[in-house]
Amino acid sequence: MEDTNRRFANIFLGLLILGIIGYFSYGFFVAKDSSQKSASFTAPEKPTPTMIVLIDYVQYKGKVGKNALQLLQEQASVEQATSGLVVAINDRKADNAKHEYWGFYVNGKLAQVGPADYQTKDEDVIEWKIEKY
């Protein structure tokens, strides 16, 4: 009986030692693995839209070296009258019968020049809105 108890104690002690070694080894490798992952992981940046387009509204940021019309034409279909006036953006035509026009705004103010003449800056917010006259 004493021999059986001693054998059980030795097995228990051996398993306990293996468990302790396993626990610390696992903790070491998990900590090392997670530290490597966190060191190399960077949160993805949320993409910022370059242009907001609704049926009656378009907004985009200015860009040094480009005029407002160029930037609009890069990302939308644009129809102009022979006078150069923008009459349609993405097939949304300003309706003369309803007294509509596409208003051109720079930083929240109605522009004082045409879009081809306005040289944008990076901080500019350009907007086009269907307005009524």
Image: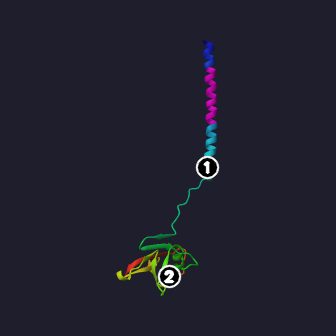
Magenta part of the protein: which range? 9-24
- Label 2 crowd (10 A; few <14 / some 14-19 / many >=20): many
What quarter of the picture does the N terminus occupy? Answer: top right
Looking at the picture, tell me which residue is in the foreground, 15 or 55.
55
Residue at 41% x, 74% y is 56
54 relative position to 7: left or right = left
- Please name the amino acid that badge 2 sits on: Pro
Relative image position of residue 69 (x, y in whole percent)? 52, 79
Q: Earlier in the sequence, mark 1 or mark 2?
A: 1
Residue at 52% x, 69% y is 50
Q: Is residue 15 above or below residue 60?
A: above
- Locate residue 132: give its quadrant: bottom left
Does the magenta run of residues contain 14?
A: yes
Looking at the picture, tell me which residue is in the foreground, 50 or 8.
50
From where the camera sits, is residue 39 visible?
A: yes
Label 1 to label 2: alpha-carbon separation? 49 Å
Find disc 2 in the rendering and name its residue: 115
Residue at 43% x, 73% y is 57
Q: Nearer the viewer, mark 1 or mark 2?
A: 2
Relative image position of residue 122 (x, y in whole percent)? 55, 74
From where the camera sits, is residue 133 visible?
A: no
User: Residues at badges 1 and 2 in contact (C-beta under 8 Å)?
Assistant: no
Classify mark 2: helix, strand or loop: loop
Classify mark 1: helix, strand or loop: helix
Looking at the picture, tell me which residue is in the foreground, 2 or 82.
82
Relative image position of residue 5 (x, y in whole percent)? 60, 16
Does the magenta run of residues contain 75?
A: no
97 relative position to 105: left or right = left
- Locate residue 55: give its quadrant: bottom left
- Please name the amino acid that badge 1 sits on: Lys
Q: Is residue 17 above or below residue 114?
A: above
Find disc 1 in the rendering and name its residue: 37
